[in-house]
Image (cartoon, grey):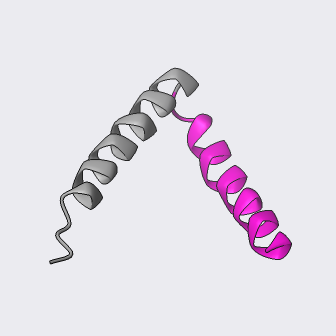
């Protein structure tokens, strides 16, 4: 579990750090927040019966 979380932190820093050079951090947070809300809504509509 430690290897996975360490590698994901490294990948996230690499991706979002590069994007943060192009886009303001505030807009990056807003965009990822909206994406998480849409993803949660999509996953919440999944029917298991």
Residue 46 image offset from top left, x and y in percent: 20, 66
Counting from the top left corner in percent of width and height, residue 48 is at 21, 75
Q: Does residue 46 lie above or below 13 as drawn?
A: below
| Residue occupying image coordinates x 42% and y 28% | 30
Magenta stretch, overall SS = helix
* Residue situated furthest front in the rendering: 49
* Foreground pick, 12 / 49: 49
Question: Does 3 lie within the magenta span?
Answer: yes
Residue 17: x and y in percent read 67, 44
Horizontal and vertical percent position of residue 27? 45, 26
Placement of the C terminus among the 4 image quadrants: bottom left
Q: How many marks do you count on the picture?
A: 0
Choose between 37 and 8: the one closer to the eye: 37
Q: Is residue 21 left or right of residue 1?
A: left
Quadrant where the N terminus sits is bottom right
In the image, taking residue 12 as reference, residue 45 lies left or right, namely left
Dividing the picture into quadrants, the one containing residue 19 is top right
User: Does residue 44 sit above or below 37 in this rendering?
Assistant: below
Examine the structure image and report whether residue 19 is included in the region drawn in magenta. Answer: yes
- What's the residue at 35%, 44% (across, down)? 35
The reply, left or right, for residue 29 in relation to residue 46 is right
Q: Which residues are magenta?
A: 1-23
Q: Residue at x 52, y 21 (%)?
A: 26
């Amino acid at each position: 579990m430690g290897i996975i979380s360490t590698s994901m932190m490294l990948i996230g820093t690499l991706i979002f750090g590069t994007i943060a050079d192009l886009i303001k951090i505030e807009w990056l947070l807003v965009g990822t927040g909206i994406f998480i809300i849409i993803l949660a809504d999509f996953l919440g509509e999944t029917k298991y019966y």
